[in-house]
């Protein structure tokens, strides 16, 4: 491939991560409106992100196998068609049951996109530049997550404040959106973005890929060997805990500010949530600097303690402090996944690729965190149920005390690629 072709493909992969960031963030931003629009409880609402992240468990491994047998272009196009199907199901059949199915489909597509994009990016940019471009993917992902709530707020505000000089986009869109469901306009916008990315993908040239050999019995036995290692199990549990913490905060943050500080979830709440996502992503830059200077376990310990302090201020302080402290948790969470993944990989002396794939299935924690908080919230209130967040943060903090990596490096390099 020429340099220009490589550049176009790298740009496309970044665009894919931008889309993933939008899809993850908009789901959290819409939770308050879904509760009111569908007339559902906290527990039932929590099953929506549960369905989204549950799909990761079922699709991550099959997606990896498919990538060995089919071209990256076919796999990515399939995932884009799949996510478009999920979004259209959501906006056309607007009810709770269909939303549950559509979010599972969208989550499945997101899992395939991520599993397919990472090895493709490594082939295109080369191993030496992989760390830089992986970090860039994370920043673009954060940009999509940051902009998504703002787009939602802009679209919703324009629909609510309808005037005689309403732009044509809103005029035609209002013909297919029922009154009281203006918030669904954000998914119509995302559907348009997906169509554009599909067209770009069709027109983009992909590199030829060597056909991978079929998995042997030894490959299957590798999983069992890893699962017998107690540290592999420990790290997997910690990553599940982290994912539950990240999504538990993201899903219920806007609703918390609506219920306890009376902030509009479509405007102020969406803005607070967007800052959480952007800090979660751009915090990697600060983390990379710290990891160049200090041992990763010390960095993890300090950031975990700061996250606990920031979270405490977020749920107990007055609204002026809370709206700064709560999204700031994202900054301190930013280094947790890559550091834990790095320590896990450095705890074994072989089968690093297999272990990485196994660890990425820990994203299932993103399904359980919001569900646990929502279920507790129905009985004791959302403020009390958010105290669950302390548990995964303490589990993450514990890693700094028991981790014993075989390779004790200060920088995590390639493992900054997020789930």
Image (cartoon, grey):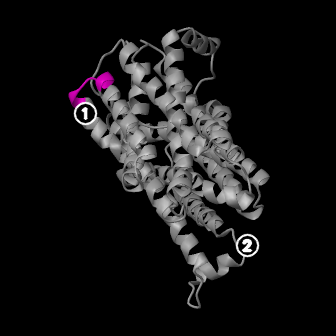
Which residue is denoted by mark 2 in the rendering? 178
Residue depicted at x 68% and y 50%: 82
Our reading of the magenta stretch's main secondary structure is helix
- Residue placed furthest toward the left: 293
In the rendered image, residue 294 lying in the magenta stretch gets the answer yes
In the rendered image, residue 337 lying in the magenta stretch gets the answer no
Left or right: where 36 falls relative to 95:
left
Q: Secondary structure at mark 2?
A: loop
Q: Nearer the viewer, residue 218 or 92?
A: 92
Where residue 183 appears, as percent x and y from the top left, is 62, 66
Q: Secondary structure at mark 1?
A: helix
Which residue is denoted by mark 1 in the rendering? 290
Q: Nearer the viewer, residue 368 or 188?
A: 368
Residue 141: which disc? none
Residue depicted at x 29% and y 36%: 288
The boundaries of the magenta stretch are: 292-298
Q: Nearer the viewer, residue 252 or 381?
A: 381
Label 1 crowd bin: few (<14), some (14–19), many (20+), radius 10 Å: some
Residue depicted at x 40% and y 52%: 318
Which of the 4 quarters of the picture holds residue 32? bottom right
């Amino acid at each position: 491939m020429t340099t220009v072709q490589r550049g176009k493909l790298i740009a496309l992969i970044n665009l894919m991560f931008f889309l993933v960031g939008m899809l993850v963030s908009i789901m959290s931003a819409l939770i308050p409106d879904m509760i009111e629009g569908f007339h559902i409880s906290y527990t039932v609402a929590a099953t929506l992100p549960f369905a989204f992240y549950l799909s990761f468990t079922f699709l991550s491994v099959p997606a990896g196998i498919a990538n060995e047998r089919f071209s990256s272009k076919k796999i990515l196009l399939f995932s884009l068609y799949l996510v478009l199907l999920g979004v259209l199901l959501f906006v056309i059949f607007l009810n709770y049951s269909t939303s549950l199915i559509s979010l599972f489909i969208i989550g499945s597509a997101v899992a395939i996109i991520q599993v397919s994009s990472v090895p493709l990016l490594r082939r295109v940019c080369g191993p030496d530049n992989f760390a830089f471009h992986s970090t860039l993917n994370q920043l673009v992902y954060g940009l999509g997550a940051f902009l998504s709530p703002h787009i939602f707020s802009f679209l919703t505000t324009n629909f609510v404040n309808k005037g005689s000089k309403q732009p044509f986009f809103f005029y035609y869109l209002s013909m297919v959106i029922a009154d009281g469901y203006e918030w669904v306009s954000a998914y119509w916008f995302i559907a348009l973005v997906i169509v554009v990315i599909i067209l770009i993908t069709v027109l983009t040239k992909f590199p030829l890929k060597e056909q991978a050999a079929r998995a042997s019995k030894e490959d299957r036995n590798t999983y069992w060997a890893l699962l017998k290692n107690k540290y592999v199990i420990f790290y997997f549990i910690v990553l599940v805990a982290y994912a539950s913490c990240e999504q538990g905060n993201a899903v219920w943050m806007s609703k918390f500010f609506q219920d306890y500080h009376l902030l509009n979830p479509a405007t102020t709440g969406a803005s607070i949530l967007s800052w959480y996502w952007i800090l979660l992503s751009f915090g990697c830059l600060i983390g990379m600097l710290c990891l160049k200077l200090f041992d990763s376990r010390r960095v993890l310990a300090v950031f975990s303690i700061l996250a606990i302090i920031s979270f405490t201020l977020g749920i107990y302080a007055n609204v002026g402090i809370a709206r700064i402290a709560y999204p700031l948790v994202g900054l301190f969470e930013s280094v947790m996944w890559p550091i834990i993944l790095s320590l896990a990989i450095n705890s074994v002396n072989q089968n690093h690729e297999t272990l990485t794939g196994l660890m990425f299935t820990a994203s299932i924690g993103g399904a359980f965190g919001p569900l646990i908080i929502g279920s507790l919230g129905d009985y004791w209130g959302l403020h009390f149920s958010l105290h669950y967040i302390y548990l995964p943060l303490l589990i993450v903090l514990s890693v700094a005390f028991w981790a014993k990596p075989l390779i004790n490096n200060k920088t995590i390099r390639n493992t900054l690629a997020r789930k």
